Image (cartoon, rainbow, N blue to C red):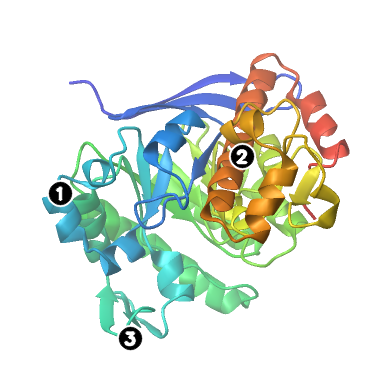
Amino acid sequence: MQQPFSFELIKTCKQSGARLGRLHTPHGAIDTPCYMPVGTQATVKAMTPRDLLDVNANIILSNTYHLYMRPGHELVREAGGLHRFMHWERPILTDSGGFQVFSLAKMNDIREDGVEFRSHIDGSRHFFTPEKVMEIEQALGADIAMCFDECASYPSDHAYTLRAMQRTHRWAERCQQAHTRRDQALFGIVQGGMYRDLRIESAKTLASMGFIGYGIGGLSVGEPKPVMYEMLEEIMPHMPADKPRYLMGVGSPDCFVEGILRGVDMFDCVLQTRTARTGMALTRHGRKNLRNACYEHDFTPIEEGCDCYACRNFTRAYLRHLVKANEMLAAQLISMHNLRFSLRLMEEIRQAIAEDRFGDFARELLAGGIYDR
C-alpha cells in the first residue's frame, strides 16, 4: 500500500549545501524550501482562497488553539474537515497551539498531564493534554499536524529549559500513541531554548522517535538572530537528512536565506500579512512604508519586476492613498504583494539551489539590502 506521505531530497547545492526537496501529501506535493502563509483562523487575513492560488501558495498554516476556541473542532469535523470548511484544496499544516497556550492565554498551569489555561477571548477555563490536542488536530484534518510541546520563553534559565524540553519529549511520545490518522503526518518539535547541549539532546531524541518531519520550535522568540542561527548550526548534524525540517514562526526574507543556508526546508510567519495591514511592503531592498509622503506622487509599482496583481495594476501613489484613507483594499493589495514576494523569492531560491549557485545568490540578496534588521 502506497504511503500518503514521502519526502524526496532531490538535490544538495554543491556551492552552499542548501537542500532542494519535495514533500508529498494527500492534497499535493510541496516543493521545498517553502514559505507557508499563515491562516490562523482558517483564513489568511485579507486574502481569499482564489488570491492564494494567484500568488501560488502551495501550503498554508492554521492554528489548533484558535480553531478550538472558535468555531470549535467538532464543527469543523461536521463541515467535512478544514479543507472543505475553508475551501482550500492544497495542503494545510496545523500548529498544535502550544505556543499560544503558553504565550496568549491569560493564565496557564503547567502539569505533567497537560496545561490548564484561560481563553484569551472570554476567560473560560480549558485543559490541553497531548491526547486532547491530537483529538483536535485529527478532527481538523490538516495534512500535517504538530505535536503538543512546551515552548520555553526567552530568556529562561537552563534548569527550567531542561524541564520543558524533557516534558516536550514525553508529550511527543504521548502524541505518537494518540495519533491514528494515516492520512495526516505528525511532526515532532525540537526544543531546548538557547542552550547548545539541550538543543542537541532534543534533536537526537526526536530523531530517534521516527517522525515524518521535524519542527524547530522555541526560536524567534526574542533572541538575537545570530543566536538563532547558532542554534540551527548546532542541531542540523543531528537532524535526519531524509526528513523535512520546519523552522517555526520565522519568515523575514533574511531569515529565509540564513535558514536555508543552514539546512531548513520549511518556514511560516504572519509578518507578510501583519505588516501589510500597517502599509508596509516587502522588497528586495528592504521594507517600504507606503504611508510615507515620498510616495504621494510615485506612479511606479511597489517593486519593479514583481508579477503580483498589485504590482501589475497599481502604483505606490494609489496604495498610499488607500492606506491613508483606511480603505480595506490597501491591506488586500499589500498582502498580495508581500505573500507573492515571499513565495517568488522561494521559487528563485529553489532555482538557484538546482543550479548549484545558491551561495552566490544568498550573498547577492544579503548585500542588496534584503536583510531585515
- CA separation, marks 2 and 1? 31 Å
Query: In the rendered image, which quarter contains the C terminus?
Result: bottom right
Residue 240 image offset from top left, x and y in percent = 50, 37
Residue 48 image offset from top left, x and y in percent = 40, 42
- As helix, strand or loop, the secondary structure at mark 3 comes to loop
- As helix, strand or loop, the secondary structure at mark 1 comes to loop
Three-letter amino acid code of the residue under disc 2: His
Q: Residue drawn 27% across and 62% down? A: 133
Q: Earlier in the sequence, mark 2 or mark 1?
A: 1
Residue 255 image offset from top left, x and y in percent = 69, 46
Give the residue number, with chain letter if any, for mark 2. Answer: 337
Q: Nearer the viewer, residue 225 or 316?
A: 316
Residue 123 has which mark?
3
Residue 303 image offset from top left, x and y in percent = 74, 34
| 321 lies above or below 90 | below
How many other residues sit within 10 Å of disc 1, few (<14), some (14-19) or many (≥20)? some
Asked if disc 1 and disc 3 are in contact, CB closer than 8 Å, the reply is no
Residue at the left extreme of this rendering: 78
Q: Residue drawn 22% across and 41% down? A: 84
Q: Earlier in the sequence, mark 2 or mark 3?
A: 3
Give the residue number, with chain letter if any, for mark 1. Answer: 79
- The part of the image, by quadrant, that contains residue 362 is top right
How many other residues sit within 10 Å of disc 3, few (<14), some (14-19) or many (≥20)? few
- The part of the image, by quadrant, that contains residue 262 is top right
Three-letter amino acid code of the residue under disc 3: Gly
- CA separation, marks 1 and 3? 27 Å
